[in-house]
Image (tube, coloured by chain):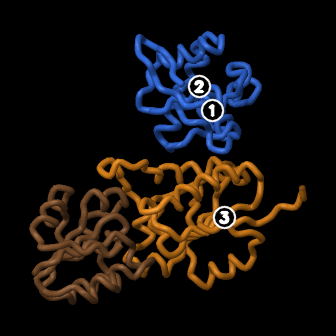
Amino acid sequence: MAIEANGKTFETDEEGYLTNLAEWEPAVAEAMAAEDDLPLTDEHWEILNFLREYYEEYQIAPAVRVLTKAVGKKLGKDKGNSKYLYALFPYGPGKQACRFAGLPKPTGCI
Amino acid sequence: MSILHTVNKSPFEKSSMDSCLAYVKAGSAVLMYEDGIYGAIKGTAVAEKISASDGVKFYVLGPDLKARGVAEDKIVDGIEIVDYAKFVSLAAENDKVQAWV
Amino acid sequence: MSEQIKKFMYVNRRAPYGTIYAWESLEVVLIGAAFDQDVSLAFMDDGVYQLVKGQDTAEVEMKNFSPTYQALGDYDVTKLYVEKESLEERGLTLEDLMPLTYEDEDDDWAEKDSIKLVSRAELADIMDEQDVFFSF
């Protein structure tokens, strides 16, 4: 599988996650979001950037409950809850947001 | 005839290093790489055996030390830290290579 | 499924990069953390090498997963037993290991050490208290 963004082709796995995480650029997130009919707002980007920082620091995509707790600590309680995160990413702040952010599928997501 | 002996297993998990040290003769060389680099750390029973091996030159692969977080000052005195290019030239310089896998 | 909380211990006895055991163990720990059990990790024999600080795998072109141990606290995995004798046999001390901490929810989020240095005899006693082992 593959996805087109910014005039380039990016290889993805059978579930749509980037094969080479190092290739990621913001246009990839935009293209993936467009395929899901989900226009990305600043609120989405805040979470995507948070996920990329988390991966940079810990080398893993966090499980949803860990992400929720970590977002709460960094961005405040009104954002660190599953209602807010699922409203932004209806297919799951773990699976969908990590895919947009160029992270692997969260460890522990089946 | 000089032999380059290579060891890539931890001396604390497998007997590769012990066997190597039992067979190595003066004038030969021993290169530790991958998990074999743990044999090069000071203050262990293996380190004592290395220090007692007269006439044998010991080498350890730098990139594998870095990967495992082993600082150069932890390495037994007299062991030379080498890169991949030196690994290749050691293999070429010696008459043969025995890999203690 | 039983409501009773069981004591799970992951027993780590392998060095990090020569084989895949260490990374596999870490992944299973992270997955298993979702099940709300009483989890602890034991590091003995070559397993103590997993926690050595300053790992840099750029030149060997492998994934450096040592930063992931820092995330264990977020996953409520806060008991990492490191066996003293294994460190000593390998010419290492606690100073050679990464400092790993967690924030204690029950103590006003105070930062506490996750690594607990224990003797072989103490670890044997801790192992005696466990219900299940996962061996790597």
Is residue B96 visible in this depiction of the protein? Answer: yes
Q: Whole-percent x and y of residue A77?
A: 70, 30
User: Compared to B9, does B18 lie above or below?
Assistant: below
Q: Residue at x 33, y 80 (%)?
A: B17
Q: Residue at x 29, y 72 (%)?
A: B99
Instruction: Write down the colour of chain B.
Output: brown
CA gap between label 1 and label 3 equals: 26 Å
- Residue A71: image tag: 1
User: Compared to B12, does B74 lie above or below?
Assistant: above
Q: What crowding class fits label 3: few (fewer than 14 Cα within 10 Å), some (14-19), or many (20 or more)?
A: many
Which residue in the structure is indicated by mark 3?
C40
Instruction: Write down the colour of chain C.
Output: orange
Q: What crowding class fits label 2: few (fewer than 14 Cα within 10 Å), some (14-19), or many (20 or more)?
A: many
Q: Amino acid at mark 3?
A: Ser
Q: Residue B94 appears in which quarter of the rendering? A: bottom left
Q: Residue furthest right?
A: C2
Q: Whole-percent x and y of residue C106?
A: 73, 53
